[in-house]
Image (spheres, coloured by chain):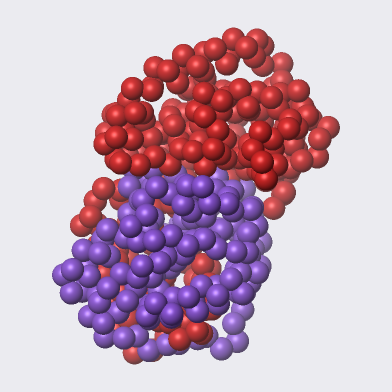
Amino acid sequence: MTKISEMPAVARGFISNLELPVFEEPAWTLPSPSGQRRVSVVTTAAISKRGDKPFSWLARDHRVFHKTDRDLVMTHVAVEFDRSAWQQDLNVIVPLDRLEEMAQAGEIGSVADEHYSFMGAADPVTMEKSAREAAKRMKHEGVDTVFLIPI
Amino acid sequence: MCGLAHYFESEGLATVLVGFVREQMEAIKPARALFLDFPMGRGMGKPNDPNFQKKVIRAAFDLFNEPNGPVIKNFPEIIPVKNGRMGYALPPELVLNISDIGDLNKLLDEIRVEMDTLRPAYDFAVKSRGRTTVGASELNVSDLAPFIAEFFSGEIPKSPRKGLPAIPLLKLVVEDLEAYYTETRTHRDNIDDLELMGKWFWEETKAGRLLLLLEAVSIASDNKVMLQIVEMSLMAPRFWSEGPLPGTSAAGW
């Protein structure tokens, strides 16, 4: 396991100095039975449909894409992650095809129509309002399960 | 990401996340978390490997069977990283100076030839994959390098894209340029190796050289925004380097 203390100097300094949010009462929601779950993906890869407004560098807002969208672009500001993987296969960061296969096999109930993208470089505390708006929209289409994937 | 999970969970949605930095997950305590010992940018591990990707998803979704939380578990398989770095990093000693710029028009000509040579393989990659990630900047591929060269005066040029200032556009142009090269080679040569791709693009191509020269121009510039983009490691991959770029503090964040 790569520990922060073992990371190279620049990354170690940046990551160890991040102010992490503290939640006094960790939230806990009972999950639905697996075969009934309707799953939406939340990514912090700052991807969006081609033609959408690019994310600003410390964006608090989010973008929505449909489960059939494949023409996505990334406007993330950071350089620390590998972009060559998602260039080869969207599923390596947003596994829509895999989830659809699992839904067809009955491992989950269904894949939501809509999925959500945030800017991972921004402080999550500043995204609370936007996240709660996304949650409202998820519940409106019957989503009960959220799969969060960083970049 | 852990903070976002808390907001969704508190809205009555059951969440599970995957993550790359276990100490952060332990500190923030999201409801259900799967630690991945993978390079960043590869949440499902391996591109074009459906079985591996499903293993990650199933391991994450198994956490919904836990009766109590917060819970963190490790995904049992590891994708090794090099020397503790979770992405490619330029060698700290590879730093160019403005005296290295030489004939900029000649360099642009060389980049044009380089990109034209890659073009058939790029087009084939796009056709084969049915998608490309190039185009976030909305500039034509042939305009990417010339736009970057406009910054070599040390001043910020006018943005050709309405509603997007030149510096944020520059970031997208740099990413588009790199994506054009790496999308082409990963497909043409059937390789999936982030270290090899980083080394090739940044250390061996003419386009990479242009970007390292842009870095040199930024450091020498009197323009604070130009300097800030190198302080923040926004263009060149130095986040995982063993030391900050000479002339900067790497403290921009």
Q: Residue at the location (40% across, 74% down)?
A: A146
Q: Where is residue B108 in the image (x, y as percent from the top left)?
A: 57, 16
- Given residues B204 and A151, the one toward you in this image is A151
Q: Residue at the location (52% across, 13% down)?
A: B110
Q: Residue at the location (62% across, 48% down)?
A: A10
| Residue sitting at the far left | A105
Q: Residue at the location (26% across, 48% down)?
A: B48
- From the viewer's perspective, is A126 left or right of B3? right
Whether residue B26 is visible, yes or no, is no
| Residue sitting at the far right | B222
Q: Where is residue B137 in the image (x, y as percent from the top left)?
A: 56, 39
- Given residues A105 and B101, the one toward you in this image is A105
Report the number of numbered marks.
0
Q: Drawn colour of chain B?
A: red
Q: Where is residue B125 in the image (x, y as percent from the top left)?
A: 31, 33
- From the viewer's perspective, is A53 left or right of A150? right
Q: Position of residue A151 (x, y in %)?
A: 46, 56
- Can you tell which chain is drawn purple? A
